Image (cartoon, rainbow, N blue to C red):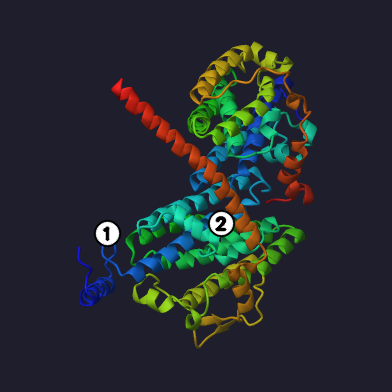
Amino acid sequence: MRETTYDPAHIEYVLRLGDNALILGQRLCEWSGHSALVEEDVAMANIALDYIGRARDLLTLACELDGGNQSEDDLAFKRDEEEFKNFLLCELPIGDFAWTIVRQVLLDTYHFHLYDQLQRSSDQKLATIAAKSIKESTSHLRHCSHWLTRLGDGTDESHRRVQDALNEQWRFTGELFAADAIDEFALAVGIGPDLSDLRERWHAQIASILHHATLTQPIDAPPVAGGRQGLHTEHMAGLLACMQSVQRAYPGLEW
Amino acid sequence: MATPSNVAIAELEEAFQQRIDREEKIEPKDWMPDAYRQNLIRQMSQHAHSEVVGQLPEGEWITRAPTLRRKAILLAKVQDEAGHGLYLYSATETLGVSREELTEQLLAGSAKYASIFNYPTLTWADVGAIGWLVDGAAIVNQISLCRTSYGPYARAMVRICKEESFHVRQGYEIMTVLARGSAEQRAMAQDALDRWWWPTLMMFGPHDTDSAHSGRSMRWKIKRQSNDELRQKFVDQSVAQAEFLGLAIPDKALKWNDTRNHFDFGEIDWDEFRAVLDGEGPCNHERMEARRKADEEARWIRGATLAYAEKERVRSSTGTES
């Protein structure tokens, strides 16, 4: 076994970012061919492509930091559920268009501020990935927040659909800012940002987006969390069974 | 304006046919016989619907692609198909029909889409076979359509063909990796070829002698080559490709003919062709159900965008007044 010169917390930090991108990207892939508007088939595929691309960069970086014995595909297709460290919000089913748009706005806003800060990461490779990601997240957020405004300030039905999705998803947002030892390590060595600062920026922007969309910000409830400890929702098993099916059925082959 | 007399129409039709014969492109605002317009609407909308419905069988495998590289490529490929659908709907709209009307015709069953998309994708090798064979067959047809007489259709085809050539290559590359892989992977590749070969040949439509729209379409140069000519071209090019992969085309009658300078091949199961066309293929119901579900969602989304636009209009007009 090769000796790694990087702190395991550093590797774990990058892995978590990679898992968020992978699992959300995987969910967005489900829209292909099923969007209500063909324009949205194109748009959702674009967003999914950005997330899958980001996942590949981040998982490859995690592998490099870990001594280079594994590949992006080993991490994506050969890990078990408890080894995935994504936020629970990423793994929830795609729901309807309203549900997907609400989730994108919550997470794209998060990613916009996160990757803005990560451009100044002390990990140069992470900073490079962030410089590319911030451009993508800027465009995702523009697209999805415009949709949220149209749906929120559209008809009674569209308003109800996005408000219901927001009410349901809100309890999963606490997890985005719950700093643990990994985040504290990342902050201390300058790899990652201060999550309490990120939380303030996120809240301010989300409040403005919701106001514009005539939506009501839900009251904070006890957060649902566990993804970053590998404790997932019931939806994760199905997602992984599907994503990993070919690799699991035919291990060790080239594709 | 007075209605043109029969004599005037005959003269217009004569002049129109002369333009076609001189290889001039017909543009949206040019006069055209109503039957030419209707023929184009039928063919172009069928083509557009095929691109959109065509996302579904391959889309099944984006979530299951065996590597992240394959996932990204397939996602981009299926995204291209949606883009092709958009160009083609837009090109069809230049003939004075709306996308909503075209969608209604699809859902009502009066407009068709390529029957090939009513077959299921059962393994990863099917993604390779679709790229290689289905997109390969589509390109044979579409290269011919780059010279079609209607300008917007011809121009859309030029762009679509460029992208389709990438699709064929990605499919063939998948097949190459499988054909050189393990025994299981080779079997998977052969099985996919066995299942997709005949439905692919059906994509070119009925024999020329049985084709309802062919004669007029050829005279108007909407179609430039006949169904049987194009099918022959596809068979001829595919034989060497299958040999290179070490896979066997499932047709015992397939044999080089020195006199014709083409491959002879067996007869298509036309009963199956008609059944799939009539809505009774393996996945017709599922494909239409997916489009119906998308259309139901489109209704409330479109309602929201119209309501929002109206509110914005009122806000901006009251804003100007105050």
Quarter-of-image position of residue B127: bottom right
Q: Earlier in the sequence, mark 2 or mark 1?
A: 1
Residue that appears at 55% across and 49% down? B295
- Callout 1: 10 Å neighbours few (<14), some, many (20+)? few
Labels 2, 1: front one: 1
Spot occupied by residue B105 in the image (x, y as percentages of width and height) = 50, 60
Q: Nearer the viewer, residue A231 or B179?
A: A231
Q: Which residue is mark 2?
A: B53
Residue that appears at 58% across and 36% down? A98
Residue that appears at 63% across and 72% down? B275
Q: Nearer the viewer, residue A121 or A97?
A: A97
Quarter-of-image position of residue B284: bottom right
Asked if residue B100 is positioned above or below residue A66 in the image, the reply reads below
Question: Chain letter of disc 1?
Answer: B
Determine if residue A54 is in view: no
Q: Which residue is mark 1?
A: B29
Q: Amino acid at mark 1?
A: Lys
Q: From the viewer's perspective, is B1 left or right of B197?
A: left
Give SS at disc 2: helix
- Callout 2: 10 Å neighbours few (<14), some, many (20+)? many
| Gap between marks 2 and 1 measured at Cα | 30 Å
Marks 2/1 in contact by CB < 8 Å: the verdict is no
Q: Are marks 2 and 1 on the same chain?
A: yes
Residue A163 is labelled as none
Q: Amino acid at mark 2?
A: Val
Quadrant housing the N terminus of chain A: top right
Spot occupied by residue A6 in the image (x, y as percentages of width and height) = 70, 21
Q: Nearer the viewer, residue B144 or A118?
A: B144
